[in-house]
Amino acid sequence: MDTQEQTFTDEVIRDASTTGYAKCSWIKGPDGDGIPEYGRPYVAFRYANPLTEEMYHKLFADGFGNGKGGRAVAFTQYPQYSCSTTGSSLNELWKWRQRLEGKAESGTIKWSVIDRWPAHPGLVEAFASNIEKTLAEYPEDRRSQVVLLFSAHSLPMSVVNRAEVAATVYAVMQRLRFSNPYRLCWQSQVGPSAWLGPQTQTSVEEYIKKGQKDLVLIPIAFTSDHIETLYELDKEVIGESGHEDTVKRIESLNGNPIFIEALADLAKSHLDGGVACSYQMGLRCPGCKSERCAESKKFFAGPENAFAKLAPSEDFSIKTNSGPGSKPNKEPEDEGDTGTTIRLIDAEIYEPSSSDSTPLIGAGAGGQEDNTDGAGKRNWDGSTDFAGLPWWQRPSVYWLLGPYFLFTLAFGGSLVPKINLVVDLVCRQYFADRQLLDPTFTFTPVILGSDNPQCNVPGVQKDVATFTLVMSVLTGVLSAFTAPKLGSLSDRHGRKKLMVIASCGGVLNEIITILAARFPEAIDYKWLLLGSFFDGITGSFTAGSLLSHSYTSDCSPPSKRGVYIGYLHACLFTGLAFGPLLAGYFVKWTGTLLSIFYVTLGCHIFFISFVYFITPESLSKKRQMLAREKYDAEQATTTNQLRSSLPNYLSRFAGPRAARLLNDRMSRGAWLPALLSANPLAPLKILAPSGRGNRALRLNIMLLAAIDTIILSTAMGAGTVTVLYSEYLFDWGTLEASRFVSITSLTRVVVLMCLMPAVNYVFRIRPMRRRQRQLGVDPQNAPAEANAGADGLDIWLLRIALVSDVAGLMGYVVVRTPGLFILCGVVAAFGGIGSAVIQSAITKHVATERVGSLLGALGLLHALGRVISPILFNGLYAATVETFPQAFFVLLTAIFGLALFASLFVRPHLYLQEDNDGYLAVPVRDPGDEENADELIDDEIQSETLPRLS
């Protein structure tokens, strides 16, 4: 059985068949039916069809297990073991074995595993022969100077054992008699933690700069072609090197007959030897906390597995000839051979000279060896994807700041005029309706954009509050569904395209607003709901903010990500501060309210044009392709699980006939994956991480997410009512209301740009530098900081922010003069640091590769908050404006008081404890795994002793 997550499917089996099963010791049965004597080959993938579960059911269908017994061998196609590859695949196999056979009394499948074979002579010979073929393409006078770059998939230093990859490299170089200089490099690094280096692409670039242009890439840890060879090595590393004629990649092993015979020899030796696994199989990673991994290793390598284990010396054995210098033996050709002579068992040992350990070309100026980026720089994850490009093609947060500021300026500038336009349109319709009912009723004409004191009556205020409630709910409901979807799509198709889509709704909304204001006699104000529909269906401001933060996360190092996101927050509040002020003066200067909406429309169009035509994409094509591949695999996994489980549930209630009908319906068409992808609540799963060791963390994340939702939703939902209340109580116009919004927003900007950095420097940066001096650490060469959860400063800043919010809101309830009302707004504005602190602190609880998913879940909550908060605040204000208009401030005070109480339970220094299975190219929780990743279910805990084969 093949457990590799590579595109190494039935073609490999067919290749093995064409090169001769008989020669590869897969002897046909005596009846000549083509079934090997040693058994049938099966294929199972980790994240693609056929999945492990499907393979297990195929075993049942072919007469294995289910009371019939039988033996099966899990044969990994990863030559070198890692808990992220072979370990993860075997954990998946063990999981399904326990669920499908864990409670069986007898007659279960007896498993053993071929878990590693890094120095098998056939593997070594296959690689060496392909290297020799590629070297033959170079002129003879340059051939010996070609540098061999062995490339393997990089992994975090905490989980990988690079000795096995190095063993393969060394064995291959022995076979080649160290004919060429060589180096081991690592590719496909993701995440900010310490990874194996140097990176393959960086190594190629640096060697070319040093004049070494003859390079051969050897994918030493990959046995077949897939995205990391065909795209990453061929298209990115070689294609972007500018030297495709001198930088080459050897052919992957694929169906190489030498490689196929090596697999056959491994399988036959394993079956004949009656072993359970390698001697190393039972050893766990030092920091492993996964219960599933522990139980899986106990099953395959523990004492309950009755198969004998290999002796320690057999794990990496290489059978040799009599001594150095002897020629490799060649096996005689068997009858019926295809004509290919294969050296399989014997490998020549060559003793390297001292010159074999000298540097290839030189360590360079820095002399760095095996650093993660090849240059000693703390680059952001993915920076190597854009290495060598001119500055205008490299993504950076600074590309966003200008257009994002303009976007928020337009958003803030149109906030008050939009409310006043709605008031004027509703007031106009309100008095017109009254005149229809009572022809004797007279009223002062309503002039759009002018002070209309006749509109400050409870009836108009009530209708305005109701209408704005409907607009907010419509936009919020639609954006709650679309914003997380746009965020997910941006992972697979790039950020800038989705940012453009999210802004198109704003353009349509502004066009409808202009038409309604320009032609009020012909276009009813209720057409503004259509603008809210377009705004919501494209994600609204929620999606724009989420995608901007995702773009920033893509192109910023973890150490500065909070600073850069803070820049975006400052842009937002600066736009809210100066936008209303500029809009108010602009309306007064032009004498028409309509002019500001033309300016807002122009800002939207400029933002779209700048992002689409000028801003570089932050996600490389490779990362987009990997995300698509991962998403498709996860969807296929979940779909297959539903297809296998739903008919069983249905048969209990509706009978087997209904179950068969459902199974037939699900097996046809693509409606089930479409239904799964439409689940709007799926992004919330990350807010409750699984695992017994994450219980306190779950509480932390949920509390922080709830507090953040309260802050953001009230900021979006209560602003309209606050403006309406101030205009109603103090008889303010557009200019006065705009000044109030500008003062409070400007206070938030000052707090974020001045006060918060100063507090951070005094209470975090200075103590850290003091500790570094005491330890003798150079700050310039200090190790990168790792996420370790929110610290004490984060928690205290959050609590102080919530206290200022509560104090300001209580002031709103009791004050009755404009000056004190503005002062209360300034006090409440000090709470603006709360959202920035939370979004910074909550990302410290997880690894960087999960930050995007976490922000997407928060975006969903923000959108839902936009639905709930207007219902609470606008509805309450409409119901109490004639009796006690301060009622909604009382409600706000109670909500923020509850948030302050919840913050008392947030604990510092909690970090997500992940299962080692999660370290993959796009790390996520095991797809289709409905149970906790670390906690074991009853079906998995149940097990039985495996008898020895006779």
Image: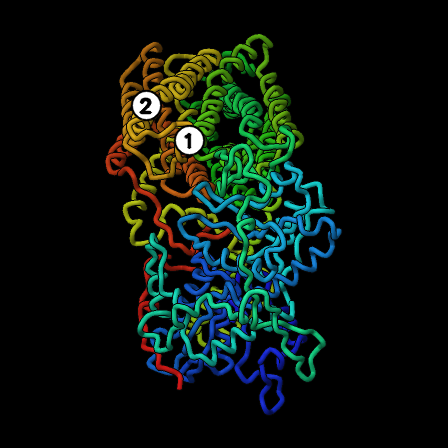
The answer to whether residue 809 is above or below residue 707 is: above
Residue drawn where x is 61% and y is 70% of the image:
328
Taking the image as shown, residue 222 lies to the left or right of residue 457, namely: right
Q: Earlier in the sequence, mark 1 or mark 2?
A: 2
Residue 871: image quadrant is top left
For residue 882, say whether it is visible.
Answer: no
Quarter of the image where the C terminus is located: bottom left
On the image, numbered disc 1 is attached to which residue?
Answer: 781
Of the residues shown, which amino acid type is indicated by label 1? Asn
Q: Which residue is mark 2?
A: 766
Q: Quadrant of residue 113?
A: bottom left
Q: How many marks?
A: 2
Residue lying at the far bottom of the rendered structure = 31
In percent of width and height, residue 429 lies at 53, 24
Q: Evaluate whether residue 232 shows in this view.
A: yes
Q: Are marks 1 and 2 in contact (CB under 8 Å)?
A: no
Residue at horizontal 38%, vertical 35%?
785
- Secondary structure of the residue carrying tag 1 is helix
Q: Position of residue 439 (x, y in %)?
A: 53, 20
Give the residue type that dot 2 points to. Arg
Considering the numbered disc 2 on the image, is that residue within a helix, a strand or a loop?
helix
Measured as percent of width and height from the top left, residue 815 is found at 29, 15
| Nearest the eye: 717 or 144 | 144
Q: Position of residue 81 (x, y in %)?
A: 46, 60
882 left or right of 207?
A: left
Instruction: Name the residue located 58 percent from the left edge and 84 percent from the top edge.
Output: 27
On screen, residue 31 versus residue 907, left or right, reads right
